[in-house]
Amino acid sequence: LILTVENFRIGSVADLLGYRGLDGTVNGYLDLVGPSVSPTVQGDLQVELEANRKNVGNLELAVGYDSLRLRLDGYLEHVEGGTMNFVGLLPVDLRLASTRGPTQTGVRVSARQALPDSDVDLTVSADSFSVGWILPFLDPAVYSRLDGRVDGEMRMLGTFAEPLMSGAATIRDGRVGLPIFGTEVEAVNGRLLFEDRNILIENLSGRSGRGP
């Protein structure tokens, strides 16, 4: 079964998932093979991302699924020139299981959660990438603004229940809006270290100013 995606609007489902402000269009295909209890998936997707009605950039994403593992290889180029790449494997259980009880179609299906001891192997790298596009994923009551550039790499290994991180990243020219305190912190510069399950802040500086 080949599923073709043409100009699918992300915003049509983003609000339902709680990611207000996230939008864009998706094009590409997904090739589904095998029975529902052990499906395999291959596909390529091209995404034009938007956040808060502003163009973010273009995402090229290759996906594959087999043996309860989702393989990702993505490259996101920001409109302002920075890039982010992510590649690796994540545990995802996409097997469909019939459940009892009457339905309109006679069958009810549900996807199951990945096992806690499933392996994780994911690497994310950024080259002067703007962090503002992730604002729709954050609580608007806590963060009203997010800007800045990030360089670095983070690798995640371990299991679904206990992922372990390694790597480092630097942030420069950052700005964070904190409506709870009625202020914005600007000129944020510093370094983050990823060590196992901890994120260590090193040489972080910023300047507090008035909120909008």
Image (spheres, rainbow, N blue to C red):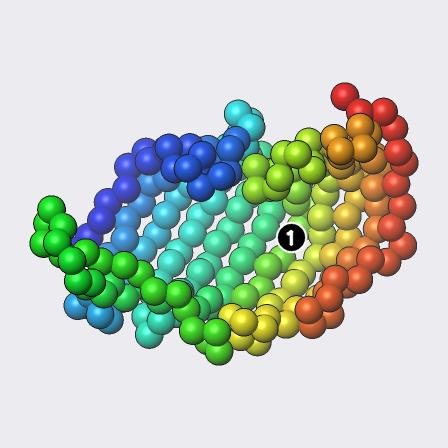
From this viewpoint, is residue 33 visible?
A: no
Q: Position of residue 88 (x, y in %)?
A: 49, 66
Does residue 40 appear to the left or right of 198 in the view shown?
A: left
Give the left or right position of residue 11, taking residue 81 as reference: left
- What x and y, as percent, mark residue 89? 46, 68
Please tell me whether mark 1 sits on a helix, a strand or a loop: strand
Residue in front for this viewpoint, 29 or 67:
67
Image: 60 above or below 10 = below
Q: Is residue 87 left or right of residue 149?
A: left
Q: Nearer the viewer, residue 165 or 71?
A: 165
The image quarter containing residue 206 is: top right
Amino acid marked by disc 1: Ala
Q: Which residue is mark 1?
A: 126
Q: Position of residue 27 (x, y in %)?
A: 33, 40
Q: Residue furthest bottom?
A: 117
Question: Could you say which quadrant of the image residue 32 lies in?
Answer: bottom left
Q: Quadrant of the N terminus?
A: bottom left
The answer to whether any part of residue 100 appears in the image is: yes
> Residue at left 41%, top 37%?
16
Q: Residue at x 67, y 61 (%)?
A: 153
Front residue of this view, candidates 38 and 183: 183
**Residue positioned 47% across, 44% down in the render:** 59
Q: Residue 4: x, y in percent?
A: 24, 45
Q: Quadrant of the C terminus?
A: top right
